[in-house]
Image (cartoon, rainbow, N blue to C red):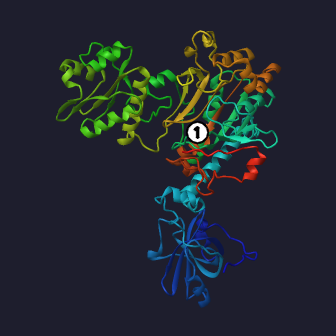
Amino acid sequence: MSELLNGQRRSLMCGDVSTEHIGKELTLMGWVHRRRDLGGLIFLQLRDRSGIVQIVFDTDVCAKSLLEKASTIKLEYVISVSGKVRRRVGNNVNPNMKTGEVELVAEDLKILSEADTTPFSIGDDGANEALRLKYRYLDLRRPDLQQNLVVRSKIYQITRNYLTENGFIEVETPMLGKSTPEGARDYLVPSRIRKGSFYALPQSPQLYKQLLMIGGIDRYFQIAKCFRDEDLRANRQPEFTQIDLEMSFVDQEEEVMTLTEGLLVEMFKKIRGVDLPEHFLRLPWTECMDRFGSDKPDLRFGMEIQNLDDTVKDSAFAVFSNALKQGGTVRAIVLKQGADKLSRKELDKLAEFVKTYKAKGLAWYGLGKEGTKCSFAKAVSEEELHSIAKALSMEQGDIAFFVASDWQTAVVSLGALRCHLASKFELYCEGDFACLWVVDFPLFEYSEEEGRFVAMHHPFTSPKNEDLQYMKTDPARVRAKAYDVVINGDEMGGGSMRIYNRDVQKLMFETLGFSDEQIADRFGFFVDAFKYGTPPHGGLALGLDRLVMVLTGSTNIKDVIAFPKMQNASDMMSDAPSPVEDKQLKELSILCEEHDD
C-alpha cells in the first residue's frame, strides 16, 4: 500500500550525505537500488540523481514493526526514510562510493510507490537497446545518462550567459513555417483551415534569423529545435537541437569564428576542465581534402595523404600509370610500424573497405621484419619500390596503402581508411581535443542526380568577393564565405556570411537554376525584405547534441537525448509514428492509400 508524505520533506539528496551530517536527523527519498536481508539487519542502497547512500534497519534501534515493513521492500520501490546518520566502520566503509563513510540508521519508513520487476536491470547498458528505449524512463535512471543530461543543461546555461554578455538577444522563431525544398527533406504538417496546404517544421531557423537582422535585432540567438526527414546515423536524429546565432554589421568570417571560439573555450573549461586554444587552426577546404580526405578531419593523429604522381608517373604498374594517363592521381597513406600488425586476410578486408568509397582497389607495400611485402611487387623493380619508400619517408616496420583513381575518390577513400586504421590501432587518446575551422568551401557542388549545381551549404551563403566574377561563367570555381568548426573529426557546427545584396541573391538563385516564378513561390517573402535595407550579417549554428557527445565522451547520440528515436525514426516508447483516427484525417482532407513495402 502506497503512503502519503503528509507534508514530510526531504532533508537533502542521497549523494550529498557526508561525515558533516553524522549524528543529525535526516529524511531521505529515492529508489531502492540494492537490498540485503541479514535477519536482524536489513541494508538498503537508496538512489536518486545525486548518488547512492546506505540505509540500515537495525533491531537494536528500530521497532520490530519497522523491520517487518522494511522486509517487504523490493528493488525500485520509491521510499521516504528518516533516521540518524552514523559513521561506517571497518569493512563496512566503501571507498568507491561518494557516501561510503556514512550510513543512515532508519527510524521511520514510508513506502511512497511500489514497483513491479523491471524488464531489465537498472543500470545495465548492455541490455537490448530496443528494450531500453521502449522503457526509456527506466533507462534514464542510469547515472551516466543522467549525467549526460546534467552536462546538456550546463551547456544551455553557459550558452545563454556567454551570448547575453556579448549583446545577443534570445528570440524564438516559428515551428510552423513554409516549405522551401532546397536541402534535406522537410517534415510536413497539414493545415486544417487551408485544405491541401502544409506547414513545414524548421530544418533550421535560417530565413527567420536573417529576417531578424533586417528587423534590426542586431544580435540574435536561440537554442532551437530543428527537424530533418532523413536517414539516421550514429550522430544524427530526425529532431535535433542547435545553438543558433546571427550577427549584424559583420562581413568577415573571423568575427563570427572568434566569438564562437570563446563560447567553446568556456564550455570545455567549465565542463571538462580542459583549456582549448583561444584561436583554432584554420584550413581551407581544398587543403583538408588533399591532406586528410575529409572536410571534417581528425587532427589527433598524422597519417596524412601523400601525392605520389611524380614518383610513379613512369611506373611499370599499370594501375598507377593508367590512372595518371586518364587524368587521375595516385595517393598514399603510411601506417607507422603497422607492417607486421596486419595479416593478409586483414589487408584484403581493408581493400573491401575502400571499395565502399568507390575506390576500385587498394595496393599496399610494407617493410616488415621478415622482409618487404607488396601487393604489386611483381610488376615493379626494386628501384621503383625504393623510390616510393623514399618519397613516403617510410621506415622499417611501416606499411603504405595506395589508391589510384580520380582525385575525389582517391582522397576520400584514403581519408576514410586513415580514420579506420587510427581507430583500430588506437592512434589517439579519447581525452584529447583537436579543434579547427574549415574555411573557403566551394559555394556550389554539381548534382549528377539533378543535373545542375546545388548550394553546398544553402542558397543564402555569400560568395567570396573576389570570386563573384565567376558566378555565371564558372560556378565550380566560386568559393563561399563559409566556415565549419570541427572537433576530433566531427563537425560541431557551421555558418557563413550571408548575401545581403538583392542583386547577388538573385544571381545566386539563377545559378541554382531557379526561375523567377520559383524564386517568388519559394522565397518571395524573404526576397521582398531585401528591398528595405539589409545590413551585412552572418551567423552560425552549433549542433548541441554532438557537443554533448564530445563533452561526455559518448559514442551514441541516443545517450545524450532524453527521448531519442530509433534508426527508423520511430519512438519505441510511445509507438510514434502511429495511425490516427479517420475523423482526424477527414478534417485535414487527407486520404491514406495502402502501399506494399
Q: Is residue 545 left or right of residue 361?
A: right
Res 508 quadrant in image: top right
Say few, some or many: other residues with alpha carbon within 10 Å of mark 1 (under 14 / 14 to 19 / 20 or more). Answer: some
Amino acid at dot 1: Glu
Q: Secondary structure at mark 1?
A: loop
Res 225 quadrant in image: top right
Residue 578 spot, x, y in % from top left: 64, 52
Residue 136 spot, x, y in % from top left: 58, 59
Residue 54 spot, x, y in % from top left: 54, 73
Residue carrying label 1? 230
128 or 107, nearer to the observer: 128
Q: Is residue 132 left or right of residue 9?
A: left
Q: Is residue 356 above or below residue 64?
A: above
Q: Is residue 473 above or below residue 166?
A: above
Res 523 quadrant in image: top right
Q: Where the N terminus falls, by quadrant? A: bottom right
122 or 370, nearer to the observer: 122
347 or 230, nearer to the observer: 230
Q: Where the C terminus falls, by quadrant? A: top right
Residue that appears at 34% across and 17% down = 323
Q: Is residue 486 left or right of residue 169?
A: left
Q: Is residue 273 visible?
A: no
Residue 156 spot, x, y in % from top left: 67, 46
Q: Is residue 233 visible?
A: yes
Residue found at the far left of this picture = 370
Residue that appears at 52% across and 59% down = 131
Residue that appears at 47% across and 75% down = 92
Q: Please tell me how many numbered marks the rendered image carries.
A: 1
Residue that appears at 60% across and 53% down = 571
Q: Is residue 306 above or below residue 9?
A: above
